[in-house]
Image: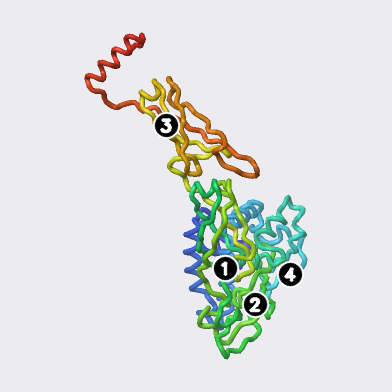
Amino acid sequence: MAATKDYYQVLGVPETATVDEIKRAFRRLAKQHHPDRNPGKPQAAERFKEINEAHDVLSDPPKRKQYDQLRKYGAFAGAGRYGGAGRGPGRGGGGGPADSGVEFDLSDLGSFGGLGDLFSSIFGKRGEGRMEEAEDEVEATVSIPFRVAALGGKVPVTLPMAEVCPTCGGDGAAPGATISVCPECNGRGTISFGQGGFAVNRPCPVCRGKGRVPSTRCGTCQGAGEVRVEKRLIITVPPGTEDGTRMRLKGQGAKGKGDVVVQFQVEPDRFFRREGLDVVCTVPINLAQALLGSKIRVRTLEGRHVLLKVPPGTPHGQRFRIAGQGIEKNGRRGDQYVEVRVEIPDRLTPEQQQVVRAFAEKAGLKY
């Protein structure tokens, strides 16, 4: 790849491209340059490698945000910008030069105002296995009813995730196939990717990081060594769960060894709304109840009903407190507040108008 190119140029999309536009560009280019469709063409494999690199970063919002920060610093403006931190010449997957740049030990970038951390979080430091951990981890957003979030409970969820292929056992080879060293990465499982004057190591796109390739790929998983399955989980929601709360389920992720990270999305309730540990509900009352006073039945969060006394002369929007009927969390419990909504009739009959006029005149009210 030329040192002046960046990931947006690799995919042929503008900086403002949406995630869908990036995915469409990736699918089109990956199909065109896939090594299986271009046997004996090393330039196609190199191009396929670049496309995967670009898609991996730009399709992930957090990675893309950090990558855009790097572009602001000029990290992709050309070779030699940070040449003083180089360790040596970058190498391609087959041992050739990669853009005549330099291969960086990412820790060398620590003095550039946090750029080292940015590079590490996007590309992963060598030897730390961050890419594998990210692939094994499954993230999901789960919608839960308001009352389940408030009181706690269990919710079922079905998640698509990767499992080891039952046919090939994970090596990607068809039964009886021979397995040899990957010609792209020479068995290392990683390749050096040059970009804008530096090079970083990434999993080899040909062998998918395994370092070895089969003579015939497994027909079940197409050589990936894993298959997508629907896994059903029962998630225990803690009482007092708020919208956006994240929970990590250890060992429930991809291939039975990663984690599932669930982010809860609390559905709105038609009756209750939340204010911290308190819950608020709105109850309509008519004009006579507001003026003369009344008793109304109000449903609590747990489904019981309490009798609430509305005193005479209650104004619209008045709140009444029902102690201890809110949300319980960490040994504390909130209250329930009942907000009354005084409903005024849209129309009055002539007789009703006469009664209201008489009342207004006796009360000295202007109308």
Q: Which residue is mark 4?
A: 89
Front in this rendered view, residue 147 or 118: 147
Measured as percent of width and height from the top left, residue 270 is found at 43, 42
Instruction: Identify the mark at residue 296; answer none if there is no mark.
Output: 3
Secondary structure beneath dot 3 equals strand
Of residues 214 and 23, the one drawn nearer to the viewer in this rendering: 214
What amino acid is at disc 2?
Lys
Q: Is residue 366 above or below residue 73?
A: above
Cβ atoms at labels 2 and 3 below 8 Å apart: no
Q: Residue furthest bottom?
A: 176
Element at badge 2? loop
Work out which quarter of the rendered image holds the N terminus and state it.
bottom right
Picture colour scheme:
rainbow
Alpha carbon separation for disc pair 2 and 1:
16 Å
Give the Cα distance between marks 2 and 3: 69 Å
Q: Earlier in the sequence, mark 1 or mark 3?
A: 1
- Residue 286 rendering spot, x and y as whole percentages: 36, 27
Q: Indicate the position of residue 318 as horizontal and vertical percent values.
A: 47, 26
Q: Residue at the spot x=64%, y=58% of the render?
A: 76
Measure the alpha-carbon separation of dots 1 and 4: 22 Å
Q: Residue at x 77, y 53 (%)?
A: 111
Q: Please, what is the three-letter code of the amino acid marked with disc 4?
A: Pro
| Earlier-in-chain disc, 2 versus 3 | 2
Residue 53 in the image: above or below residue 114: below
Q: CA distance from mark 4 to mark 3?
A: 80 Å
On residue 210, the disc is: 2
Query: In the rendered image, which residue does mark 1 sit on?
Result: 52
